[in-house]
Structures are given as C-alpha cells and as structure tokens.
Image (cartoon, rainbow, N blue to C red):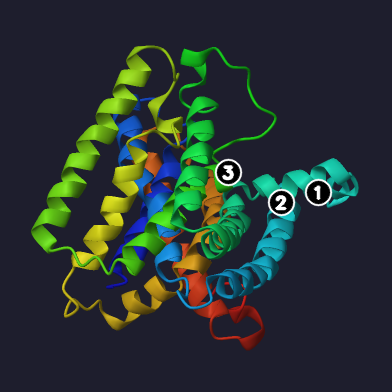
Amino acid sequence: MPVALRLIAFIAVVLIHAVADSATDAATAADAIAVLARFAVPFLFVAFGYFLSSRAPARTALRLLVRLAPPFFVWALVYILYFKGSLAELRSPAMLVRLLVTGLDGQHLWFLPALGIAGVLFALVKSRLGWGAVLALTLLFYALALAFGPYRGLFDLSRPPFNTRNGTFFGLLFVAGGAWIREDDIRPRTAPALALFALATILQLGEVAALHAQGTIPFPRFTDDTLMTIPYGIAAFLVALALPPTLRLPPLLAQLARLSHGLYVVHLLFLDLAVRLIGRETLAACLVDALLAVIASALCVLALDRLPFTQRLIR
C-alpha cells in the first residue's frame, strides 16, 4: 500500500485542528474543511487493523500497545509542561485517569492508547469468540458513540462523563474493518475505490449538514463521528490500497510518510506556536498556521529521527 495517504491524513488532521474555534470570517468554509478532513483518523485506525498480524493478532496488538506507551506518556508530559508549566495536576488520581483517556493538554494524544486498546480488544474477541462477536461489539460501541455524540440531542440524552469519540467506542469498528479487509484479501481497483470515496464524501457532508440544520450540532466542524464516517474512513483506506504500487513519493516525502506517527504527536505544539505568531481569526491565518505547523513538525521529526534515543518517540 502506498504510504502517500498517511502523509495526506496527517495534513488533514492539522487542518482540523487549525480551523477549530477560529476562522470567524469564513465559518462555512472552515466547517467544510473540517468535515472533509474527517476521513483521517478513521483511516489511521483502519490501517492499524489491516497491518495486525493474522497469525498472532493479540500478541501483535499487545506489543504495539507497549510500544505506544512511552511516546504517549513522554509527549503528554511535554504538552502539560508547555501549556501549564507544571505537572502538579497529575497528583490527582482522577487527572491521571483523564490523562489516559484524553491526553489532557495534548488533546490529540488520546489516539495512541485508543489505538492500542482497540487493537488488543479486537484481537482477543476475534481469537476467542470469532467474527460474529466482533461485529456485535463494534456495532454496539459505535452506536453508543453516535447516541452520546452527534445524535445526543435527538435522543435527549445527558452528556456522558467521557467523550465517546476518544477511545474504543470510536476506534474498534475501524480496526476490525481493516483486519477484515486484510483477511478477505480485498484488492479494489482505482476507479471504483475513488467513486466510493466520492460517494462517501457526499454522504458525510449531507449527514453533517442535516444534523446542523436540525440544530442537533451547533458547529459542523466539531462533529467527530457520524454514521457516514464509517464508509468515509474505510473508503479512504480502499483508495490507498487501490493506488498503483508503482506510485512513489520523492525520498524526503516518503521518509516523512513513514514518520507520520511522529508528525502527529508533535504537530499541536507547533500549531499553537503558529497561532501565537499569526493568529487564527481569519481562514487565511488558519491555513498559514497549518502550513507552518506541517513544516515545523517535519523538521522536528527529521531531527529526532537522527538520534537513537529519540527515534522511539516518533516511530
């Protein structure tokens, strides 16, 4: 699978974070950018499930969870120190739990433990109970994510004590989807994969627009998971699978694509620095912020990748 989509997914994540709580001069355009970029995180979960070892999925997932722990905790501490200047809040057991679930000031870091836990849970359920149990559990979890997320207003539900987007409720379905694509050896052709992605894009925009029109969600750009997010994220991965293997990135971009994990964990630091420098009141400023964050993140991970003791924090 060409790695180009991993780099595109990273840029999409930066764009989502760049337009959040900003771009008051072009709110509709900012909403559209955020909604269109929402394929990125599901795509990364699907890719994770796809590359789980089919022979020993539980062992592979557990090994990856252990590998994800050091970068998660190190970068979480970096973000807390950067934004708060102190680790005093971690004295509270409740804050330690919140750290594991949300990443606290490194709010994007929720992705790392969620990825590992979803992988381990999928592997255990699949190996012990089979695909039927996996399907039932993924549908249950995602239904809860929808009910307490974008559809909470329709069902008149109270706000849960946790964000159902940040964790296994959201990620398990996509991890299972990636593993299923690998097990069935699905090899899509480019044209059908692109057509499916285009259709999923339209459906994603339509569902979010309908939810916004009904007053269920106040701002479309903050809608993390919808029903159409499922085909949208999976279709993005199918496009990556369908791209010809002869497609090659320039060496520098190929290296950055392989370091997409590191780009993801560091980018919020540089995005905040860009916002302090440029501001975020206009859409143009947000796009400049995103560009500066992408460039600075790339330079950072390239430098960290040259040092053996920091490589593990970005790979």
Rendered position, 213 above or below 137: above
Q: Secondary structure at mark 2?
A: helix
Give yes or no for contact between labels 2 and 3 (Cβ–Cβ under 8 Å): no
Residue 97 falls left or right of residue 268 = right
Q: Who's the residue at 42% across and 43% down the image?
A: 16
Residue 17 percent location from the top left of the image: 47, 44
Dividing the picture into quarters, in which one does residue 239 lie? Answer: bottom left
Kindly identify which residue carries mark 2: 100
The residue pinned by badge 1 equals 96
Question: Amino acid under label 2?
Answer: Leu
Residue displayed at 59% across by 80% down: 311
Count of numbered circles on the image: 3
Work out which quarter of the rendered image holds the C terminus and state it.
Answer: bottom right
Neighbourhood count class around disc 1 (C-alpha, 10 Å): few under 14, some 14–19, many 20 upward:
some
Residue density around tag 2, few if under 14, some if 14–19, many if 20 or more, within 10 Å? some
Q: CA distance from mark 2 to mark 3?
A: 10 Å
The x and y percentages for residue 141 are: 53, 40
Residue 295 image-quadrant placement = bottom left
Report which residue position mark 3 lands on.
166
Q: Nearer the viewer, residue 29 or 1?
A: 1
x, y percentage for residue 28?
30, 26
Tag 1 secondary structure: helix
Asked if residue 196 is positioned above or below residue 77 in the image, the reply reads: above
Tag 1 near tag 2, CB within 8 Å: yes
Mark 3 residue type: Asn
Q: Quadrant of residue 67?
A: bottom right
- Identify which amino acid the numbered label 1 is placed on: Leu
Q: Earlier in the sequence, mark 3 or mark 1?
A: 1
